[in-house]
Image (cartoon, grey):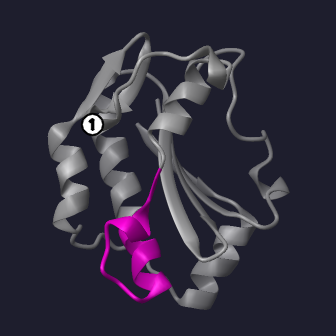
Amino acid sequence: MIKYRWNKKFQEIIEFQEIRFQEMELPVSLKYFLDKGIVQKDGCFYFKDFATNYSEEFYDKTGNECFNNKFYIDSFTESLEIKEDIQIGITFVKMVAKSLESYNISFCVILDYHDESIDIRFHKIRKNETWLMDNIDDYENEGLFLAYIN
């Protein structure tokens, strides 16, 4: 099952930008990541093209996944409108979440909007490892849209 959450800052952004949660057509470059799939390596999950060896530099498996799966939406879109990039980002998060459901493992897919930039990343949810603060409303300068897969 997939549950979506977002913080107060993201709520302000979607209201200001008049964003709807309707799915949009993804650019070919983003569909590519979905088509290539997700792989497991060294106990971590990655977009296939981002798969790498585990590194202690990132403290734990969650850190490895979040660092190595991160990319910026505007690198894959031709949009000049932040509103459209946010809507594409929301669609992409939903599609990644749907693809992760098949693993029957808990994951979190994160859209982070800050400084006119949108990045996406995901990680497996593990005991004693965290990426985000428990209270996502504590992120006052970042709009967060999250998909939790259980």
Q: Position of residue 112 (x, y in %)?
A: 59, 59
Q: Position of residue 36 (x, y in %)?
A: 17, 39
Q: Amino acid at mark 1?
A: Asp
Query: Relative to 12, does residue 110 appear above or below in the rendering?
Result: above
Residue 127 visible in the current orientation: yes
| Residue nearest the observer in this picture, 26 or 137 | 26
Q: Residue at x 21, y 61 (%)?
A: 29
Q: Quadrant of residue 6?
A: bottom right
The part of the chain drawn in magenta is 71-88
Query: Relative to 131, does residue 124 appear above or below in the rendering?
Result: above
Q: Residue at x 71, y 64 (%)?
A: 142
| Residue nearest the observer in this picture, 79 or 108 | 79
Answer with left or right where residue 83 lies relative to residue 11: left
Residues packed near mark 1 inside 10 Å, few (<14), some (14 to 19) or many (20 plus): some
| Residue nearest the observer in this picture, 12 or 67 | 67
Q: Position of residue 9 (x, y in %)?
A: 73, 70
Q: Residue at x 47, y 84 (%)?
A: 83
Membership of 21 in magenta stretch:
no
Q: Position of residue 99 (x, y in %)?
A: 27, 39
| Farthest residue, direction top | 42
Residue 125 visible in the current orientation: no
Q: Quadrant of residue 74?
A: bottom left
Give the position of the N terminus as an image quadrant: top left
Query: Relative to 67, does residue 104 appear above or below in the rendering?
Result: above
Answer with left or right where residue 59 lies relative to residue 78: right
Q: Which residue bears the numbered disc 1?
A: 49
Q: Secondary structure at mark 1?
A: helix
Query: Relative to 93, does residue 86 appear above or below in the rendering?
Result: below
